[in-house]
Image: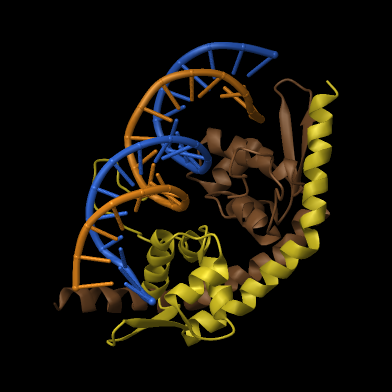
Chain colours: A yellow, B brown, C orange, D blue
DNA sequence: CGGCATCCACCGGGATACTG
DNA sequence: CAGTATCCCGGTGGATGCCG
């Protein structure tokens, strides 16, 4: 989308901050992880149990993403067996605010959305 | 994720409202469309021009999704040439609030995220 | 003008197996 | 315990073309 017509270099890598942020937290697991870490630090397997239906694969991947973007910190304790702890950074914690707004809205209006879908569905079928 | 082991029926279609909402507005275009419609009603091609780099395909698809979920209304004026107008519903307008929170956060902290990425990147390369 | 149908490339994410 | 590597499938979204 930002590539030039003849394959020239990209001018604006992130033309829209919101797009950039959504790409990160709009995936399957990021929000769940941030919520799980909101109460406090957790280890890898604790996170798995907390979230429930996430694979090691995706948990690992998503955690790395969140770490890269500065939402969480990863601390490795070189013991045997190894122990790794994940904690929200101030940036990550600051994100909880708007996120909770969104969650609250979703909770409040989810019923309305489901109802709207049902209405739409009904209108199609009464053809 | 919600399917039973042997292909039995699905028990919880929407185990998490926030998941359901994110799946809808987390895509490439929904947010942009809602923002574009915030000032007022727009026609199809006006939306295309407003957003800029969206294909007819995706605009059409996303608009239908948003209509199904009750975020917008579609009004067809059977003239020649046909005219179609899209408007936010009260539900859609109510969503603008938490959405603006998120956008504001993204704007405010986008720099920090980019910086965090750069730091991470640098740490990898100094191996 | 405002779509829908078709084809296709990409990649997110699941399953599984292996490593330190 | 905490990952990484590999394979693979399905959904998302771009491009194009046709229709009312």
> Residue B112 falls in which quadrant of the image?
bottom left
Q: Quadrant of the C terminus of chain A?
A: top right
Left or right: B22, with C6 as reference point:
right
Residue visible at 58% across and 74% down? A35
Percent position (x, y) of residue B36? 63, 52
Q: In which image quadrant can residue B104 be found?
A: bottom right
**Residue for point 68% across, 68% down:** A103
Residue ID at (77%, 30%): B76
Q: Nearer the viewer, residue A95 or A56?
A: A56
In the image, residue B6 above or below residue A80: above
Q: Residue furthest left?
A: B127
Tell me the residue at 66%/54% (across/down).
Answer: B20
Q: Is residue A110 left or right of residue B8?
A: right
Q: Position of residue A67 (x, y in %)?
A: 39, 75
Q: Quadrant of residue B3?
A: top right
Residue sitting nearer the eye, B90 or A59: A59
**Number of residue marks:** 0
Residue B91 can be seen in this image: yes
Q: Tell me: residue A29, above or below residue B60.
A: below
Q: Is residue B60 above or below residue A87?
A: above
Residue A58 on image: x %, y %: 42, 60
Answer whether residue A1 is visible to the viewer in this image: no
Q: Report x, y in % for residue B113.
A: 41, 75
């Amino acid at each position: 989308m930002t590539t030039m017509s003849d394959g020239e270099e990209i001018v604006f890598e992130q033309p829209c901050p919101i797009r950039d942020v959504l790409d990160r937290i709009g995936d399957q697991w990021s929000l769940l992880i941030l919520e799980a870490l909101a109460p406090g630090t957790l280890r890898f397997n604790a996170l798995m149990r907390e979230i429930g239906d996430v694979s090691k694969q995706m948990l690992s991947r998503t955690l790395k993403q969140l770490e890269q973007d500065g939402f969480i910190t990863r601390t490795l304790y070189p013991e045997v067996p190894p122990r790794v702890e994940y904690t929200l950074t101030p940036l990550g914690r600051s994100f909880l605010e708007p996120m909770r707004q969104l969650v609250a809205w979703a909770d409040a209006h989810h019923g309305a959305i489901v109802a709207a879908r049902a209405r739409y569905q009904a209108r199609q079928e009464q053809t």
